[in-house]
Image (cartoon, grey):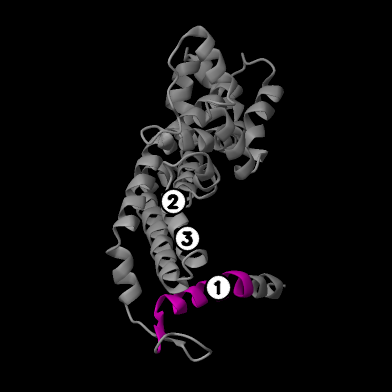
Amino acid sequence: MLAPAIILFAAFMAAPILYTLYLSFQKKQVVGLGLGSGGSSQVFAGWENYAAAFGDPEFGASVGRVFLYGLVLVPCMLGLALLFALLLDSPRTRAAGFTRVAIFMPYAVPAVISSLLWGFLYLPAVSPFYYIFDKLGWDAPQVLSSNLILFGIANIALWGGVGFNMIVIYTSLKAVPQDIYEAARLDGASEIQMALRIKIPIIAPSIVMTALFSMVATLQVFAEPTTLRPLTNTLSTSWTPLMKVYRDAFTRDDIYSAAATSIIIALATFALSFLFLKIVQRRAFGQED
């Protein structure tokens, strides 16, 4: 019964990972002018590709940008998702079904489509917002400028990701027994007190899970800046680590360097996820022991 799942995992997960790991220790060696079928060959490179990746200033700069991007995106995304979930779980909320669908709907829009939609809204020549600001005589910020492009990309991810995290947290809230809330109301607890002292501590595992998903998605940001790049000259081909991997592999035809960078990104993602879980494990999952 497990054979189909094992075969699919081996063919589409394990095998590509092992092949990427193999390529990361290889390099192309050019013989002579490099012409003809024997002009180049693949040889063992050891740790050369990894040393080059760590010493590449473009890679370091892209990591720094993604780090700042995560500092902006993850707290805002989780904060809004938690706020919306708590508001929808309140007995005073009206039209909860419509509101839930409306908040979740942007998540169903592919990242490329949402990036195009917001990209045109960021362009002063075609954006209705800039037209309104111009008629009112206001100076609108240039979102595609080098100082604000990070926030523009974070806004796209925020618009599309809040709904998913909200649904996860809201589902956990609906699973909490109503007897707990009734007992708290009999003791005179307000909705805010129940949210801070009862709801949030109980659903802490779900908050941790959404935080972990958001961190992983942040480290893998690719579609939004790649889609916006033709609209502005403030985004380079190595703005994020994955964009650098794509450029090295498919533009510069350096699959060996791209493979090494991919392995570094994968290991960094695993390490950060493991460290994050170790830090919050006792606080979030202690109640389940």
Q: Which-is-in-front pick, marks 3 and 2?
A: 3
Residue that protrudes farthest toward the top in the picture: 136
For the residue labelled by badge 1, is the local secondary structure a helix, a strand or a loop? helix
**Viewer-proximal residue, 256 or 279?**
256
Mark 2 residue type = Leu
Residue that protrudes farthest toward the left in the picture: 55
For the residue labelled by badge 2, is the local secondary structure a helix, a strand or a loop? helix
Q: Earlier in the sequence, mark 3 or mark 2?
A: 2
Q: Which mark is residue 247?
A: 3
Q: Earlier in the sequence, mark 3 or mark 1?
A: 1
x then y, percent, for residue 285: 43, 46
Mark 3 residue type = Arg
For the residue labelled by badge 3, is the local secondary structure a helix, a strand or a loop? helix
Residue 250 is left or right of residue 256, and the answer is: right
Q: Earlier in the sequence, mark 1 or mark 2?
A: 1
- 193 drawn magenta: no
Mark 1 residue type = Pro
Q: Is residue 169 above or below residue 227?
A: above
x then y, percent, for residue 78: 47, 34
Instruction: Determine whether label 3 and label 2 are within 8 Å by CB.
Output: no
Residue that numbered label 2 is attached to? 219
x then y, percent, for residue 157: 52, 38
Q: Which mark is residue 16?
A: 1
Q: The N terminus lies in which quarter of the figure?
A: bottom right
- 3D distance between C-alphas at marks 3 and 2: 17 Å
Label 2: few (<14), some (14–19) or many (≥20) C-alpha neighbours in 10 Å: many
Q: Is residue 145 above or below residue 267?
A: above
Residue at 53% over, 30% down: 123
